[in-house]
Amino acid sequence: MKAVFFDLFETLITEKTRTDFQARAPIHERLGTTKDRSSFWWEENEDAAMRGKFPDCLARFTDMCVAVGSPLTENEIVMAAQEHEVWKSKVLSCVEPQIFEMLRKVRARGLKVGIISNALPEEVLAWRFCPLQDLVDPVVFSCSVGVMKPDREIFELACSRMCVQPSEAYFVGDGGYDELRGAASVGMKAIQAAWYQDRDVEWSGASPLVRIDSIGDLPNLLC
């Protein structure tokens, strides 16, 4: 094995399970609409947004506000988008020490490290502030390449950029977006990262899905 690709959110960075990130109003309240209307819009537009339909956060917020009949003015939508971008920069700048230690140990074993993430433009923008940059090689964001997990193309693209075959690479993720099945479908060795999210993952692979509950246990497993 030559490389390890990680999911980003809820694998290397957590927003949902950090208590200091929980005191923020949900997007539907910030955009002056209801949870049901916001959720319906997201269900209709999520895949397209993750594949780059909207060039930035402002374009997405504007489209949603028009669709749901939000009372926000144009200036208020601009302010909401700017605030959201600042928030994402904060999220991506906060990485737990155990993650750094784990990545250094993985690299010390001679394995290349990359990231494959479904992401929105404001998250790509916020990556500039992420202290993980020096510990990873290629970073493949869905909205930048026009394809998202679990589509096999995004895994094949990441392996190509790393100059490795899928069979020579691990993929480690919490299991959202059916990413573990997607990685396995191209020949990667899928590993469930359960240290932030305890997901029930449907699995039909030839061998049992490997699950890791502690960040510190991963490097030894890869040996």
Image: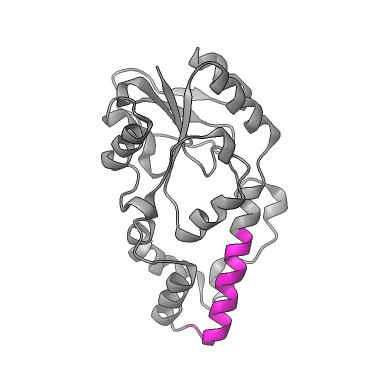
Q: In which quarter of the image is residue 26?
A: bottom right
Which stretch appears magenta?
A: 70-87
What residue lies at 54% left-to-right and 22% top-to-bottom? 107
Q: Where is residue 88 in the image (x, y as percent from the top left)?
A: 59, 57
What residue lies at 61% left-to-right and 51% top-to-bottom? 129
Q: In this view, does 164 lie to the left or right of 124?
A: left
Q: Is residue 70 above or below residue 101?
A: below
Q: 82 or 107, which lies in front?
A: 107
**Residue 152 is a magenta residue:** no
What residue lies at 50% left-to-right and 69% top-to-bottom? 35
Q: Position of residue 218 (x, y in %)?
A: 55, 21
Q: Position of residue 104 (x, y in %)?
A: 61, 25
Q: Position of residue 91 (x, y in %)?
A: 63, 52
Dominant SS in magenta: helix
What residue lies at 35% left-to-right and 37% top-to-bottom? 158
Q: Is residue 68 above or below residue 19?
A: below
Examine the rendering and report whether any part of residue 170 can be seen. Answer: yes
